[in-house]
Image (cartoon, grey):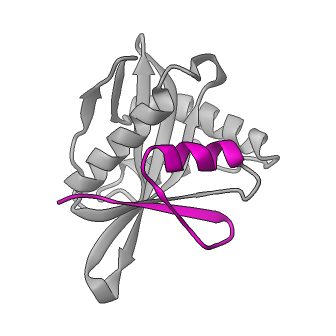
Amino acid sequence: MQRDTFFQETPFGVVRDARQADTSCILGLVSKLAEHHGDTMRLTADALMQDAFAEPPWVHILVAEIDQKVAGYAALCPLIQLHFGVRDLDMHHLFTDADHRGRGVGKGLVEACKMKAKMLSCGYLAVGTHPDNRAAQEFYEAIGFLRRDSHPQRFSLRLSS
């Protein structure tokens, strides 16, 4: 996939492509997300650098920045429906630091993910949640994602051309 520079102003700050200088902030947020799920983070700075900043990147990471500090991130992984000739992106992670929740950061990140997916010629944006995470499921449905029958809960959003 071609790497495009993404930058979007929002009511809370900006959402932009992650930079190598964001690595420690992203690792901190990934660690908080892992802890929230009862997992142990194994991601290293070297692995993150290789996956997010190589050409081409394996994963696209967008960060929400408030007052020049990273407040949240989304990690996007490529998917494909080869038989239909359709590229998709999976929003593998969406996380906002606790100090910045309730300010529209998550919704701003999702909107930016939709725009990034369109920049990469994707037809769908997909996301999964834990079956018990009703708040996340309601959030995704409220912003237009459709629920799919699966475990964990999967949602998708068709992107207009």
**Which of the 4 image quarters holds residue 8?**
top left
Q: Residue at x 79, y 49 (%)?
A: 39
Q: Which residue is rendered at x = 22% and y = 40% of the image? A: 5
Residue furthest to the top:
67
In the picture, measured across the screen, residue 127 lies left or right of residue 58, that is right
Instruction: Residue 118: name its quadrant.
Output: bottom left
Quick check: 60 above or below 95?
Answer: below
Residue at image point 45% right, 34% down: 107
In the shown orientation, is residue 83 left or right of residue 45? left
Is residue 28 rendered magenta in the image?
A: no
| Horizontal side of residue 149 vs 18, given as left or right | right
Apparent side of residue 39 relative to residue 98 in the rendered image (left or right): right
Measured as percent of width and height from the top left, residue 47 is found at 54, 52
29 and 135: which one is in front?
135
Residue 28 image offset from top left, x and y in percent = 63, 31
* Part of the protein shown in magenta: 134-161
List x then y, in percent, for residue 64: 43, 28
Q: Position of residue 44 (x, y in %)?
A: 61, 46
Nearer the observer, 4 or 55: 4
Q: Residue at x 36, y 46 (%)?
A: 113
Asked if 74 appears above or below 58 in the picture, the reply is: above
Q: Give the image quarter of residue 150.
A: bottom right
Residue 138 inside the magenta-drawn segment: yes
Q: Quadrant of the N terminus?
A: bottom left
